[in-house]
Image: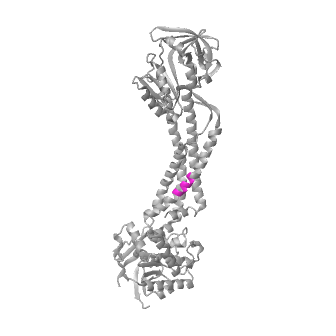
Amino acid sequence: MLKIAFRNIFRQKRRTVLTALAMIVGFTLSSVFIGWSDGAYSDIISMFTRNRIGHIQVHRAGYLDKPSLYDVIDGYESIGEKIAGVEGVEAWAPRIYSAGLGSVGDKTMGVQIIGVDVGREVKATRFDRKITSGAIFSDIAAGESILGVGLASILKADVGGKIVLVTQGTDGAIANDLYRIIGIAESGDKATDRMACYLHINDAQDLLVLNGRVHEIVVIARALDRVPKITAAIEAQINDTALEVSPWQVVAKSFYRAMQADRQGDLIGRMIIMLIVAIGVLNTVLMSVLERTREYGVLKAMGTKPGQIFGVVVAEVTFIALGSIFIGALFGAGLNYLLSIYGISLPQEFSYGGIVFQTMYAAVTVRSLAIPAVTVLVSAILVSLFPALRAARIAPASAMRTH
Amino acid sequence: MAPVIVTEGVTRVYSDDGVPVHALRGIDLTIERGEFAALVGPSGSGKTTFLNVISGLDTPTDGKVWLNGKLLSRMSGNALSDFRRDNIGFVFQAYNLIPVLTVEENIEYIMLLQKIPKAERHERVLAILDEVGLGGMASRKPTQLSGGQQQRVAIARAMVSQPATIMADEPTANLDSKIGAELLDMMYRLNTQTGMTFIFSTHDPMVMARARRMITLKDGEIERDEVRSP
């Protein structure tokens, strides 16, 4: 039976080539679609996490849902040492957050005070690369501040100027101080850059009366796909129910959900491609069954069971699908590889999750080959079921009267 | 002799655009083992329909058919397939060889369905090819053979599994008279040597001349049933 199915492929070479072409084009398009999407999202996630939120964050329980000045982490240095000991952790950095008012000259603006440990922040989020003018903090706190580029523009502030910050300390008193502006930073997220006023961690602790405590520990993992395992390992290592360890998907819930929704849109795109392919394949398979009606009648007359005839038709389509998947995989992987190296420059930059992109790159992933392979195979088999059923139900006497 | 085929009141009515066409009208017939019988009659008399019904390829509208003692109407689709595979060999007017298979593969097809071991299949194919005068052509494709050679392959395919009955529908219609006569002589010889039952549906006077029994159909009924001495 398999021999008949296999040799049938070569009977109408042009039809086989057309059927295979439909599958190959469908596979390749679908593969590039997924590779492109994987590459783009990988870049977006990498930029989003690496630049800003990190891969994992540690907070006091409940802080993520309702951030509060008073929800602080005690002894962050020892916790950080434990985190650094977890396999797969590349870097960690403590942070302090508070809202306040910033005044430069006669301009006042609501700001987000972000206290950073400069040495650790450079290792974790490449903070030094964000400085567009001026300098980065020195190791010792010296009453310095770095403003987000948007905030500097609104306050008409520049390097060398001074900013007065007014906020509330954890002791309940009004806290205020004057800081020299030593740099302007651009994080890539416009919303952050309109509000951010970075302080040396010790300056921020003094201002907010935090007594050596912080609000957040940001962790960078060596590989994005190992984040769930590393999150669990950090949880086990810290072993403190008062603290919450959250992967980036939890930290940036709305960003993650938007990305997942986008991916659902991709799925619909792929399904439309495969539907068009399936209709083309159905047409050619039906035609071939119609042409071989007499032959199927003869096979049945000789004692071939309906199930075996059914199998011949399905096997023929399956053989074509497997060949097409092989060729499509070569094309798909090749195109994705080229796009992963050269990318495509967009005529206009676009922003996703606050991060601006100018060139998009694809990625060669297992998904970009496995999903189209399964889709092509399953849709080809599904599409062949109806013609196969028709062939299996052929009445031999009437089939042999056809020409 | 034991009957191979027994029919009782076999009727077949087709619908032609809603108009009933009576192809067979209550045929009662018994064919004994080893017969070399011809179903004859004008076009539309019901020869091919009757051949299809008694071989289980078509279902009678009414009446019963026993083949080798089995009532065909009692059998399911798969059981009928197995029964045809093991009990009937078919020879068709248009040869109906499977074009993607070689001569050997065409002939061994039924044995494959019967799950006969490869070595035995090969041996039997070579033997039957010699029998039908096609030794050395096992690896050829049907398209590389003449019409007469293709019909010999079809006869070999029908006989190789040693069925009790061979049903031949106008087997000589597409052949010239010389080749047709050769094939008929061959089938006659095989019939006498092996005792296989041969039933022909035919217009061909050469077949009629060789048949030991001639059943004449007219308008779906048996007009004459004549047993002749060889």
Q: Quadrant of residue B80?
A: bottom left
Residue nearer the viewer, A242 or A330 = A242
* Residue pictured at 47% horizontal, 21% vertical: A78
Q: Quadrant of residue B72?
A: bottom left
How many discs appear?
Answer: 0
Residue nearer the viewer, A299 or A168 = A168
> In the displayed structure, would residue A238 be above or below residue B74?
above
> In the displayed structure, would residue B229 be above or below residue A241?
below
Is A336 magenta? The answer is no
Image position of A34 (left or right of B87): right
Q: Is residue A119 visible?
A: yes
Is A324 magenta? The answer is yes
* Residue pictured at 50% horizontal, 68% vertical: A295
Q: Quadrant of residue A149?
A: top right
Q: Is residue B44 visible?
A: no
* Quadrant, the C terminus of chain B: bottom left
* Quadrant, the N terminus of chain B: bottom left
The x, y position of residue A31, in whole percent, is 56, 45
Residue nearer the viewer, B184 or A396 = B184
The x, y position of residue B60, in whole percent, is 38, 72
> In the displayed structure, would residue A200 be above or below residue A396?
above
Residue interval drawn in magenta: A318-325
In the image, farthest residue toward the bottom: B229
The x, y position of residue A336, in whole percent, is 60, 43
* Residue pictured at 48% horizontal, 8% vertical: A174
Tell me which secondary structure the magenta stretch mostly adopts: helix
Coloring basis for residues: one colour
> In the displayed structure, would residue B204 be above or below residue A331?
below
The x, y position of residue B41, in whole percent, is 46, 82
Image position of A375 (left or right of A155): left
